[in-house]
Image (tube, grey):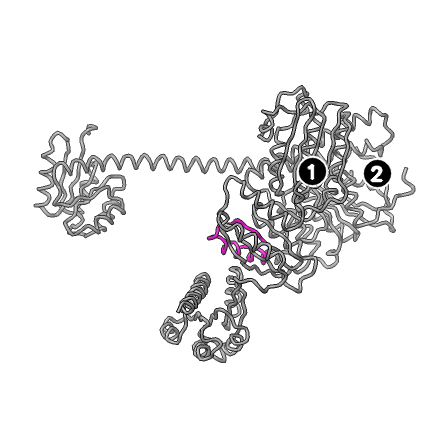
Amino acid sequence: MREDTINVLLIDDDLADATLTLSALKKYDYSKIFPQHAVNLTDAICCLRSTSFDLILLDLGLPECVGIETLSRIRREIKDIPIIVLTGLSDEKTALESLEKGAQDYLCKNDVTSQTLSRSIRYAIQRHNLLGELRTANGLLTKKNQRLAKLYETAQQFVDNVSHEFRTPLTVIREYTSIIRDGLSGPLTESQTSQLDSILNRTDDLSLMVDDMLDISKLEAGLLSVWRRECSVKEIITNVQHLLRRKARIKGIDFTISVEPELPNVFCDEEKARRVLINLAVNAIKFTPAGENVEMWARLGESCSCVEVGVTDTGPGIHEENLNLIFERFKQFDTNIHSSTKGFGLGMNIAQELTRLNLGEMNVQSIVGQGSTFSFTVPKIDPQSLIEQYLNQILRSNDIPHHISLLLANVESNAKSNAHPVVDEFLQQFLRSRDLVYQIDTKQLLLVTVCPKNELKELLYRITNDWSNFSKNYPSETLPDITLQMIGSWDLQTQKADFVSAYYDSVSINDHHGITDFRKVLVADDDPELVQALMLRLGASGYETISASDGKIALEKAVSEKPDVIILDIRMPNLNGLEALQELKKNDITKNTPVVMLSASIRDQQKTLDHGASFFISKPYDSKDVLSAVEASLNTQTTNCKTLQMI
Amino acid sequence: MHDLNLVPTVENTFPNIVCIDDDLDVSWAIELRLKEFKVNVFRTYYGVQGFWETMRVKPQLIITDNRMPQGNGDYVVECLKRNPDTQNIPIIVYSGQSDTSLKQRMLGLGVNKFITKPVEFTELQGEIETIIELQPRLDFF
């Protein structure tokens, strides 16, 4: 077959139509179209098996089958060929459907002329070829992407494993050196001591590099989680000074520490703050020549909402044009420092990322010839400073989230007093580092999350679920139940002020009352497992739930607890669901409360709706459907109230 | 490489510490460091061995690695915490792994402290001292 010829198979059982189409094809003589005609499906399939065609012209009404099915049958026979569907006048709907099913084009038989047909054929073939290329390219890209993802994962895993495997030999080297250095194995000369100090110093460098590698790999993968809680800056500084003092001593640098007295406690992940401080100080010691000074300091920040911690050196300083570059990865400037003291060039970048995780900011000031000051902030523990720093952080990030939501986690009231840190850490591990968990008191934690609005319910459900799994696997003591409540959700661009005021309201709230978005649902079913499942689902969406095991109890609780929605199963002892429903609708207190009915028999549907149920759901059901029914009945209720008020 | 004179003499009046680490150098170092205090250190090589040693000597403290053959730290801790005879013995995990999830799981299992290797011995000693009193041995040196 030459490249510019087009073999066309026309499948049409109507001989008159076919003759017209064929003559239209022939008229367009220079187009080199070679048509072949098949009168039914069997004939067509025979042709398709014996000859290779470039295109099929298909009439959908054939003796063996009619409509879209015809197209599917042909497609089953041969996948990779463009098809143009020929239709009668009234077949518009089928024609459009055939496009969806993979036909390239459709032509109404009345419109068939040699021009339209030829154009359609050429376009169809071209489109078909392009589509094929696109598909191949896409497949290739998907494969490459998968491969890349796999490689990336392997690399991450490798970094993780290597770093961990490094630690044990490092520990051994470090510990034995230190045992010898401390004279436990016998007396040492002064030069032996200083040589051993150098070994210790370099071992510390190595283990800091391992930390850097791990941090970077986790930051990259977004897996670095934080546990922010109340800490003392003084303690953080005390923790790191030992290592830094030795480094400075070896280098011959005068190392001093000055901490302002009576600093307020801060809210941060202590370990991460420590890593930032070490990175800054190690850098300063590294680049400052012997005989100069390095000072580590902490003071109350200018705005008083944070504590500022920093390191000032009297080293060479950094040129202004280089100041912004120091936070880039693997960036090191040409210095006179001997190359063996260089690390990966990751330190500053990590310091900045970790500072952000701690809701702080990094600052650098430097004058060439005089020295540099690197510092970072950590928010004070009070709720006002916290939310200010948090919002600052969120609004400055590259992808500003749209919604911000407040959730309240209530720890079961009879829980042991030491349970809340476990809950706190669990929640912080669960949420991402862009979210905030603030402990209001030992019974309540406030969650600020930038989770998209449509995923909030899912989030609530997952937290509740994961917590119950986590508690089950917690052998040493029983953990309390937690219930989650939705306080509200705001658009960060337009309702920031509303959000902040709701936040302030929440941090000073100490009981359940006063939260408007708080609905109570009564679940009545004699199967305790079904009740439990529904209560879990509803609880996860922020509803308070009460349960009843039969119709009589349900009635009593409906009157005494005044739930916002009632869920009734039909088959219950004492008083069945239908009877309970009738009673509820007779009672003045409960007659306006929406009722969702559950039954295994669809025959109950009409009866229950006739008696005033808002929704009927047949068993087996998806608890999500019940949830939507509850929501919908609450919404209609609100609209009803609104209409009433308007009247 | 280890001197014979390091082999401990067990004093019945001293508190016992069971050390579980597949890297003998690590537990040797801990023992060396603690030699100057009134404690008995029992070194074991892998998880299950650590569990049996614990049953035998009823220590006042267990220091364990996590990644080990024949019963990792996770497993040992779980066994110890499930057993009424051993569930109240304080445990320090001293591991080369630093993942927060492991740390959380271990703390969840009820260990007292999770320390990532390597640390300055004074830090480990500080943690030991929150659990048992380290009295200097007068006969040392």
- A490 above or below A558? above
- What residue type is disc 1 on? Val
Q: Are marks 1 and 2 in contact (CB under 8 Å)?
A: no
Position of residue A187 in the picture relative to residue B103 (left or right): right
- Of A573 and B9, the residue lying toward us: A573
Residue A515, by quadrant, is bottom right
Q: How many marks?
A: 2
Quadrant containing the N terminus of chain A in the rendered view: top left
Q: Residues within 10 Å of mark 1 (few under 14, many from 20)?
A: many
Q: Which residue extends farthest top?
A: A336
Q: Is residue A454 on the magenta stretch?
A: yes
Quadrant containing the C terminus of chain A in the rendered view: bottom left
Q: Give the main secondary structure of the magenta stretch.
A: helix
- B45 above or below A251? below
In terms of secondary structure, where does tag 1 sit?
strand
- What residue type is disc 2 on? Leu
Magenta span: A447-469
The residue that label 1 is drawn on is A309
Q: Which residue extends farthest front?
A: A647
Mark number, residue A482: none
The residue that label 2 is drawn on is B6
Q: Is residue A51 on the magenta stretch?
A: no
x and y, in percent, of residue A192 in the image: 82, 25
